[in-house]
Image: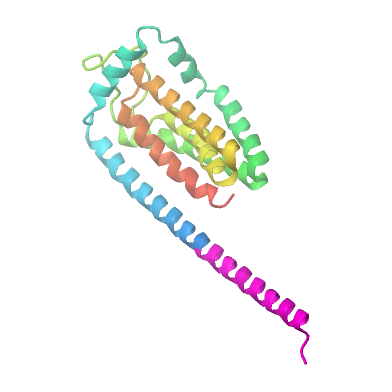
């Protein structure tokens, strides 16, 4: 005659094993769905970035550029000290310090591969940006349309500032969004978004870039960063 206690123990073990198998299958399905979603978003972002870049190359001013610029300039007033200071953070030597800081934080958050890819992301954006800017040759904003506080050399799109900030702070944003957890992730994501918005607004209120320059440049470099983060 079978021992009831032993039979009951074996039954519980079978149920536990079945539950673990089910949880494992659900986890695998969730991971596959998440991976497909990430691939779809990257592809969509790439297509949108290319389409908008072509549009920016063919159009000096996109709808909303003048209105948004004038609104921001009226909102922030005449004192542009803050905007000039933020602009300097995307130029040598500060941009090297920014890239180094992001690499160190990436190492702490996700390991050495994330740190190496942070450097690759920043280097690719900074080196490729000027060549793309000269090829597209979109004119910068002029006093005919908005107030130009500082006349910047070169062309308007893509925004080198946005490429620098997007390839460093934007890279960190995507990395911590996928690696950190709980309150830590919320704080990092919020901080990165504030910096990206402040940086973009600074370039627009100075009359150095159109809002479309900054937004499309951010989109371009975030797609690049998102691709690299997948290998972190």
Give the main secondary structure, helix, strand or loop, of the magenta stretch: helix
Q: x and y percent of residue 81 in the render?
A: 45, 10
Please give left or right for residue 204 compared with residue 8 in the image. Answer: left
Q: Nearer the viewer, residue 14 or 168?
A: 14
Q: How many marks?
A: 0
Residue sitting at 41 percent across and 50 percent down? 42
Q: Position of residue 194 (x, y in %)?
A: 47, 27
Residue for point 72% across, 78% down = 8
Looking at the picture, does residue 160 appear above or below residue 230?
A: above
Can residue 28 be found in the magenta stretch? yes
Where residue 77 sits in the image (x, y, percent)? 35, 9
Q: Residue furthest top?
A: 78
Q: Nearer the viewer, residue 120 or 187?
A: 187
Magenta stretch: includes residue 92: no
Q: Quadrant of the N terminus?
A: bottom right
Check the image and report above or below for 151 versus 181.
above
Q: How is the image coloured?
A: rainbow
Q: Nearer the viewer, residue 159 or 203?
A: 203
x and y percentages locating residue 69 in the rendered image: 29, 20
Q: Can the viewer see residue 11 in this picture?
A: yes
Outermost bottom residue: 1
Residue at (43% x, 16% y) in the render: 83
State the image quarter where residue 198 is shown: top left
Q: Is residue 123 visible?
A: no
Viewed as shown, does residue 191 lie left or right of 4? left
Q: Which residues are magenta?
A: 1-29
Q: Residue at x 66, y 71 (%)?
A: 16
């Amino acid at each position: 005659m079978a021992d009831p206690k032993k039979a009951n123990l074996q039954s519980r073990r079978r149920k536990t094993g079945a539950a673990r198998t089910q949880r494992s299958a659900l986890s695998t399905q969730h991971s596959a769905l998440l991976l497909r979603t990430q691939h779809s978003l990257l592809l969509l972002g790439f297509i949108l970035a290319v389409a908008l870049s072509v549009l920016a190359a063919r159009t000096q001013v996109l709808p909303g550029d003048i209105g948004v610029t004038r609104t921001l300039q009226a909102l922030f007033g005449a004192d542009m000290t803050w905007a000039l200071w933020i602009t300097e953070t995307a130029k040598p030597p500060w941009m090297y310090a920014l890239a180094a800081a992001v690499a160190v934080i990436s190492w702490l958050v996700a390991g050495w591969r994330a740190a190496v890819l942070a450097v690759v992301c920043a280097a690719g954006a900074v080196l490729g940006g000027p060549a793309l800017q000269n090829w597209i040759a979109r004119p910068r904003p002029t006093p005919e349309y908005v107030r130009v506080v500082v006349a910047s050399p070169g062309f308007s799109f893509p925004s080198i500032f946005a490429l620098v900030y997007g390839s460093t702070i934007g890279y960190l944003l995507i990395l911590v969004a996928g690696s950190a957890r709980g309150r830590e992730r919320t704080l990092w994501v919020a901080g990165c978004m504030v910096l990206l918005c402040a940086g973009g607004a600074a370039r627009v209120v100075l009359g150095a870039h159109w809002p479309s320059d900054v937004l499309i440049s951010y989109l371009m470099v975030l797609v690049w960063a998102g691709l690299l983060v997948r290998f972190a």
